[in-house]
Image: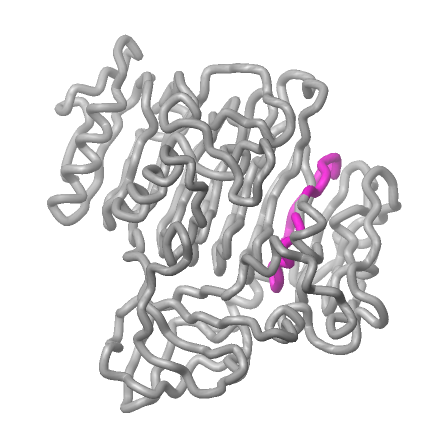
Amino acid sequence: VVANALTHGAAPDGSTDSAPAINRALAEAGERGGGTVLLPPGTYRIDDYLRIGHSGVVLRGAGSGRTKLLATRNLTELIGPYGSRYGGDKSSWSWAGGLIWLSPQARHDSLVTAIRARAWPYEGWTGNTRDAWTTLTTVRPARRGDRTITVEDPAPLRPGRLVVLRLADDADHTLLEHMAGGGPGPEAYLWDDKTKLTSYVPYEWPVRITAVHGRRVTLERPLPLDARPEWDPRLISGTAALTHSGVVGLTLEAVETPQSPHLLDKGYNGVTFQCAYDCWAEDVVVRHVDNGFGLVAASACTLRRTRVEGRGSHHPYFCREGAHDNLIEDFRVAARTVPAPAGTQLHGINVEGLSSHNVWSRGVMEMGTFDTHRGMPFANVRTEITVENNGRHGGDASAGPLYGARFTHWNVTVTNGRAGLVKIDTIAPYSATVGISDVREFDQIDVPDFTGELHARVEAYGTPETLHPKNLYEAQRDLRR
């Protein structure tokens, strides 16, 4: 333990603004090389957002039922209006930022500077304009699933180093076709006018190196895609990541205000991980928020025993801007406590923006949906979830297909019988819909983005209670032990 927030001046009776004291404690812990900042039982008023910008720093309350942060202001007030880099009058606080924001300090500072300058930024590993990177080495051809690759120059590489695999698309959009599973349907798809989608490439995938033997480099996880010469595969260094930091054992409650009209959120947002790797939240509740838990260009992060409660939110969970390999387990989206105001929209457990290989496991959703939000996310899993399927997906037409290849929905009980976004065998290529309850189409009904055979499967339909294994993620993990 590095610090107790009380010794820095935090007030557990809510009488004064504790944000400066907590932020000082977090910053000092980081400057000392990491550690835990304790928030003893009580209610702490915060008039600013909390920032974890150093690796190895954990903000730890006494439990979500004992330590509460009461947030009085939103991110528009604290940082400023945040427009969309794609134009229009939308507020990017509708899908970005948090009142607890875990992001490496230098990257966070540059992002906030750009927002205040109204130079609406990209949010990921390669900077506000996606040019803040250097090549470490190019990569020889490799196949999806390979863990050992061959590089041209191993000199900059060492075990333990975090690198980013960069894959650029070609003029024929064959990288996007590959993400969609390949074949006649993706080849016939019109990609050129999907300008939001094409702005998401190059695909950037952070990964840690575990071994270097000559030019043979072993990675922590298998390749998510092929590395083909036409995509100029290379390992690059981008922004320095936030690693091994977390938030544990507290409730973040925003002052209760009416939910804003769709895409005009002010930024009463919960906990967001950005350019974070191997970070976590555990036993954390967010209440009365615009958007709950965010993974923005975050990878290998774990959210465990998290809950979204209160007056209703836009995105209870959002996973975007190339967020990969994250786990959200034992989660709950509680039913809203007040009716939804006119003009608002509820999504659910969101994934978009070429985000891949994320898992939602053991969840209860009293409202919301499996919000696959265009931007062609791929290879994501939702397993052992009960859902009152009453949310809707969003996503601009210019963001392209709803689904890339290899989505799996496994053991899902739908309490209101609605099929949309859960039973995906007629819309998602190379997908598996396994062990979902009997459903029918009503409300928002989608049509396939790709023509022809989807190579999708549906199994154990209508009988989730008979499915074995119950949880696909846990079964796959057990096979690796």
In the picture as drawn, the residue positioned furthest to the bottom comes out as 214
- Between 158 and 386, the one lying in front of the other is 158
Q: Is residue 357 magenta?
A: no
Task: Where is residue 449? Give x, y as percent.
Answer: 78, 60
Considering only vertical position in the picture, is 216 above or below 317? below
- Could you tell whether 425 is left or right of 346 in the image? right
- Could you tell whether 189 is left or right of 89 in the image? right
Name the residue located 58 percent from the left edge and 33 percent from the top edge: 90
Name the residue located 61 percent from the left edge and 43 percent from the top edge: 349
- Between 400 and 248, the one lying in front of the other is 400
Name the residue located 78 percent from the left edge and 53 percent from the top edge: 423
Number of numbered discs on residues: 0
The main secondary structure of the magenta stretch is loop
The residue stretch that appears in magenta? 373-394
- Assign the N terminus to one quadrant of the image: top left
Task: Where is residue 164? Give x, y as percent.
Answer: 38, 67
- Could you tell whether 414 is left or right of 282 in the image? right
- Assign the C terminus to one quadrant of the image: bottom left
Q: Is residue 392 magenta?
A: yes
The image's colour scheme reads: one colour
Residue 4 visible in the shown view: yes
Name the residue located 68 percent from the left edge and 68 percent from the top edge: 180
Residue 307 visible in the shown view: no
Residue 426, picture quadrant: bottom right
Task: Where is residue 440? Give x, y as percent.
Answer: 88, 46
Task: Where is residue 249? Give x, y as percent.
Answer: 36, 34
Considering only vertical position in the picture, is 204 above or below 135? above
Considering only vertical position in the picture, is 156 above or below 300? below
